[in-house]
Image: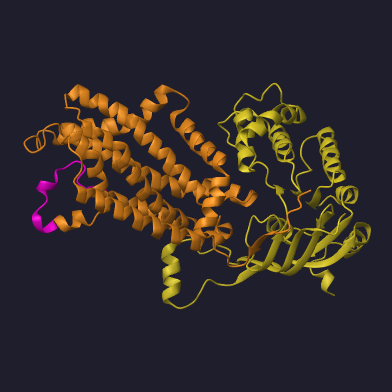
Amino acid sequence: MSDRFAVRLHRVAMHFPARREPLRSLKEWAIARLHGHHDGGVFWAIRDLDLDLRQGDTLGVIGRNGAGKSTLLRLAGGIIQPSRGEVHIWGSVAPVIELSAGFDRELTGRENVLFNGSLLGIPRREMRKRMDEIVAFAQLEEVVDAPLRTYSSGMLARLAFAVATSVRADTVLLDEVLAVGDQFFRSRCHARIAEMCAAGTTLMLVSHDLTTITNLCRRAVWLDEGRIVAAGETPAVLDAYRGSAGVPGAART
Amino acid sequence: MNDTAAPAVVLAGQRPTLRRECAQVWARWELLVNLVTRDLTVRYKRSLLGFLWSFLHPLIFMVVLTLVFGTLFAQRTPNYSAYLLSAYLAFQYFLQTTTKAMASMSWNGPLLKRVYVPASIFPLSVALSGLVNLYLSFLPMFLVMAVLKVPFSWSLLFLPLGGVLLFLFVLGCSFALCSLAVYFDDVRLMYEAGIYSVMYLTPIFYPLEIVPERFRPIIFANPLYYYCELIRQPVFTGRLPEPETIAVAAVWAVVMLILGWQVLRRMSPGFFRHL
């Protein structure tokens, strides 16, 4: 771990429309405007949060469902803009989030690999060079020229993971994606992540699997209702989290 | 490790600037190429037959309307089929692209949540693939002209340029419409209802001359009229479009581009909340 920063979040907040059925029609919006009331309340997914991630750091993010973990990861990757505050990002970031997005069922596995590469900003030439390695890692040599709609969900997940992690980036953001495939594939995924971290890649990992966090992350933050409840060395944070027994708002008392 | 001192900064309330958006799209030109080719391969289903299939719709439209109106307008417009088809291709490019641009935002919504992608790349790719399709449809149109013995003239060389002017206008409209469609579900429905009235207000399948003088300002206020003429004149009259027609089309293109971009840059930071 160096003293250079990879990602810094400064007083970052992020809100979403709180309404169960958000105002989705222009007609309703115009009527609401005329009557003078604005869109109802807002739901704050992240509230005034500060977070520093140094280069080479490995940070696990834990918390209940809806605690704001995925939103935090997207903010750190510069994928979404905060409602308040500032996000600073040094170097390249590879988000490994919602893997199946960006796959086209009509294109072949190989075409999808190239398409996904271009989505992540990797030149086609470079992607062709990595093709064999990606296909081998995903163990899809026999079906790579078939359209994606013929793949099983496990095959899709393997291909997606292989593509996303073939990117060499300074910072890698992983959202709950280590739970794909069978246990053999999973252990190879873990090995690949550990290898990247050993090479100095900064890692931010969201997971419900505390064993994964323990194995891969030196530091952890526990998020609840959009705030950081505890941050520090992984074992201490995990103990505190386990102690809360997942009771909502337990951290505040 | 990357040693660049200056970090990328994402601030609240930040709107993309034109320069930044262009740089971001340029940096992803391979993605743009992939989006365009994917759109075309899906449209043509990887075959020549697929391309002919996509041209079948304007062709059927032409045949049916020629059967219905051909004799009615024969006096004023000889070669009615060519008159109709050329303008209809221009209109169809506009209609299909704006409609697909709105749909492209909801299709690609998951993508925008997964990596940072400049939002304008989706309407841009749809407008580009539509332009390729328009250029390709000129070929079967020439075939129709040959069959109908419509004379070919040098002014046909103007068609690609007319296509570019139309592309710029379509792009501006798509920027605005796709942004609104992300926020409001009913925009697509209202647009689809409205655009058909616009189609009847555009002299595509009837000659301008049958519109009474006092209603003509309505036609002249409709930008699509000028774009239809850009494509139609070289085919039908064998002459270049009038300079005024070209000028009005160019002004509309610039105005819609500026307007569309302003709508997109204001709305795109909030896309994530609505997709």
Q: In the image shown, does A137 or B15 lie closer to the viewer? A: B15
Q: Residue furthest bottom?
A: A36
* Residue B212 image point, x, y percent: 9, 53
* Residue B118 image point, x, y percent: 55, 52
Coloured how? by chain
Query: Which residue is at a point 66% across and 29% down the rendered structure image?
Result: A128
Colour displayed for chain B in the image of the structure: orange
Chain drawn in yellow: A
Question: Is residue B165 toward the left or the right of residue A9 in the image?
Answer: left
Question: Is residue B62 toward the left or the right of residue B119 in the image?
Answer: left
Query: Which residue is at a point 27% across and 51% down the rendered structure image?
Result: B249
Q: Is residue B119 visible?
A: no
Question: Is residue B183 toward the left or the right of residue B254 in the image?
Answer: right
Query: Which residue is at a point 50% across and 34% down the rendered structure image?
Result: B37
Q: How many marks?
A: 0
Q: In the image shown, does A89 or B78 lie closer to the viewer? A: A89
Query: Which residue is at a point 73% across and 54% down the rendered structure image?
Result: B4
* Above or below A95: residue B56: above
Question: Is residue B61 toward the left or the right of residue A115 in the image?
Answer: left
Q: Is residue A148 visible?
A: yes
The quadrant in which residue A60 appears is bottom right
> Is residue B72 found inside the magenta-colored segment of the image?
no
> Is residue B207 found inside the magenta-colored segment of the image?
yes
Quadrant position of the C terminus of chain B in the picture: bottom right
Magenta region: which residues?
B197-215
* Residue B209 image point, x, y percent: 10, 47
* Residue B222 image point, x, y percent: 24, 54
